[in-house]
Amino acid sequence: MRISRRVLGAAVAAGLVASSAAACGGDDKKDAGSGGTELKGVKVEVAAKWTGPEEQNFRKVLKAFEEKTGATVTYASTGEDTDAYLGPRLDAKNPPDVAILPQPGLLQQYAAKGQLKPLGPDVVTEVDKNFSPYWRDLASSGGKSYGVLAKAAYKSILWYRPQAFADAGIQPPATWADLVKDAQTLQDAGTTPFTLAAASSDSWTLTDWFENVYLSQAGPENYDKLAQHKIKWTDPTVGKALETLAQIWGKPDFLAGGLAQATKTKFDASVTDVFGTQKAAIVYGGDFAAANIATTKAKVGTDAKVFAFPKAGNTAPALLGGDIAVAMKDGKGAMALMKFLASPEAGKVWAGLGGYLSPNKNVPPSAYSDPIAKQLIAQLQQAGDAARYDLSDLAPAAFGATPGKGEWEALRAFVQKPSDVKGTQRRLEDEAAKAYK
């Protein structure tokens, strides 16, 4: 199913910024009064892709659920290929109680096979109280609610070291042309401009680079068509975006360690390369990169700041992603956790840890521990109806969400041979044609 995204900007912005302190406080008091033993002895298994700081923070959210209910929760990491992990377990009739899905397409896929449990009435009520219609629709299929948007990611930013910019005498760029010019200025000043996470396991970052450039150049309508494969990847608009990316990807001196290192660099390492070992000045990463930065001595908001992904065309890009919690087993433990994840209480715990944005409208801005969140909310508001959900996450998983295959690998190959625009387009189209059947 392809959900209309016309109202995304306004709906998501409203979902992120609207809050009611009184409502939140009332819910928390009611929840606190429910005791901490109603699920004593109940075991709940949760599977998600998160590792490193994201996993550590999510475990703290799960700990809050345990303390609230008395349940015992275990966590399993699916790795980047969530479907490859969950598929065999579903086939064996032994899925986790709750899974966190990184793509809406997976929710549709599992729901169509009857592998998800519809949300219970009390969970639906909690979702209705706390989420805007867009987010509710995104986690539904066939008229039934299956998911809770547990975490939102804002993906139209670049992180940078202010000191490196100051030393080179530059300001954050507003346009792509300025970004390329500033990269050369940094290089001339003795600082490598970028780290690029182009390892096979983490080349999802390359899809985000592409989508930001494409949305800005081709515009929201063409973006929607490409997301639904109503425009082929051999279209000139795709070629133009690749040519634009080559202005940075095609210059090995712009990349920390050159091409050889870039194709081995994972996302966590790319962030550390900028804010830990200071091998470069700029790194791509959504708001969630704040959690990675927290593992270094750099402080978000002072040593680590963000600027909006520069405009490569007429549209200021605003991309969002989201992780959807779904229940895969019947039982009060699974539904209780789903209700908790839909509550402001869970969102507040996570927001206080950094590297997180909540699509829950009743998690107030004051709950966030890092200063970047308000800046990102402002960007979302300014984007309005032009904001879009991550294209690769809307595509079939075989094309948009599989390490070593589809869009991930085609763009990774393009990094290694950025002169081959036409060949890359053909490869993308071949892979898309197979996946969208």
Image: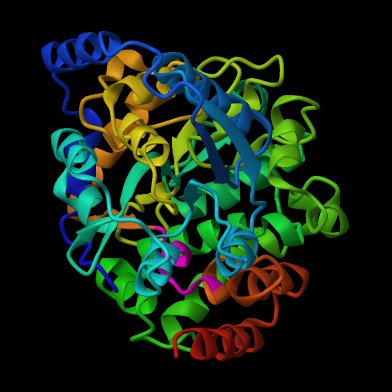
Question: Where residue 286 appears, x then y in whole percent?
Answer: 50, 41
Residue placed most toward the observer, 352 or 408 = 352
Q: 22 or 204: which is nearer to us?
A: 22
Magenta stretch, residue numbers: 390-397
- Reply yes or no: does residue 417 show up in magenta: no
From the image, which quarter does the N terminus lie in? bottom left
Judge whether residue 160 can be spotted in this image.
no
Main SS category, magenta section: helix
Q: Is residue 265 above or below residue 227?
A: above
Q: Position of residue 363 (x, y in %)?
A: 27, 23
Q: In the picture provided, is 31 more to the left or to the right than 353?
A: left
Task: Name which residue lies at 49% across and 71% down.
Answer: 241
Q: Is residue 179 visible?
A: yes
Q: Magenta stretch containing residue 395, yes or no?
A: yes
Side of 385 where 251 appears, left or right: right
- Residue that appears at 80% across and 34% down: 279
